[in-house]
Amino acid sequence: MGLFLDTRELNFEVACVVVDWRIYEHPILEFDRGPEMTIYLDGRPLKAFSNETVSAALYANGVRVLSKSIKYHRPRGFFCGIGNCSGCMMEIDGIPNVKTCVVKVRDGMRIKRQNTLADHLAPLLNRLNLSPMTYIKMFTKPMTNTLLRTKAIETITFILRNRFFIFSSLGKKVY
């Protein structure tokens, strides 16, 4: 006779409960959801409405992690809702880097979480102890574009910082 329950003898059945996080009744606002449709996240069917954005439909179905950060693979989710951040970028119908917070759902839409090159190289890259900026430059933008943009920003910054000197000396004669 023991005080502890032997869990090896019990048969557990795991029940999957789907919770709908949508607001159906509100004292002030009215919602025009449109017809119900089905979208697929990594092959799994989810319920959505035609007037919802993809990220709102995913959030309503309990999906909180939409992507992961580049270096530390920290979870990122629905953040700004207006397309300014990159927390909700996913692959939609084969098109990568789509901001799901500004795209409305379509029936049969196929959505995938993106795996970047950094995901596959993570074990090696974590041993190198590179700075986060190095990761951003390596895996989000091509290096040639980064160098050109950096040079253009440096030139514009130089002109703006020295505009008083440049414009004040334009009309004067130098002897």
Image: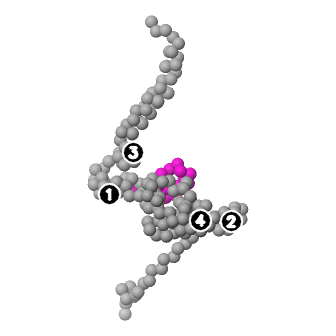
Residue named by callout 2: 26
Q: What is the spatial separation of the Cα atoms under label 1 and label 4, in whole angstroms?
A: 35 Å
Q: Which residue is drawn at 35% across and 57% down?
A: 119
- How many circles with numbers are drawn on the protein? 4
Count residues near mark 3 (Cα–Cα under 10 Å), then give few for <14, some for 14-19, many for 20+: few
Please state the horizontal and vertical placement of residue 156, each as a whole percent of the image.
46, 30
Was residue 73 drawn as part of the magenta stretch in this picture?
yes
Please state the horizontal and vertical placement of residue 59, each as a whole percent of the image.
53, 63
Mark 4 or mark 3, which is nearer to you?
4
Q: Which stretch appears magenta?
A: 72-89
Q: Is mark 3 on a helix, strand or loop?
A: loop
Q: Is mark 1 on a helix, strand or loop?
A: helix
Q: Which residue is at the front of the view, 69 or 88?
A: 88
Specify whether 131 is left or right of 61.
left
Q: Which of marks 1 and 3 is nearer the N terminus?
A: 1
In the rendered view, tell whether residue 133 sits above or below residue 162.
below
Q: Earlier in the sequence, mark 1 or mark 2?
A: 2
Q: Which residue is drawn at 59% across and 68% down?
A: 36
Q: What is the spatial separation of the Cα atoms under label 1 and label 3, in whole angstroms?
A: 17 Å
Please state the horizontal and vertical placement of residue 151, each as a whole percent of the image.
40, 32
Q: Which mark is residue 120?
A: 1
Tell me which amino acid carries mark 3.
Lys
Tell me which amino acid carries mark 4.
Phe
Q: Which residue is drawn at 39% across and 53% down?
A: 70
Q: What element carries label 2?
A: loop
Mark 2 or mark 3, which is nearer to you?
3
Specify whether 42 is left or right of 118.
right
Residue located farthest toward the top when viewing the structure as drawn: 175
In the rendered view, tell whether residue 99 sits above or below residue 108.
above
Residue named by callout 3: 141
Residue named by callout 4: 49
Mark 1 or mark 2, which is nearer to you?
1
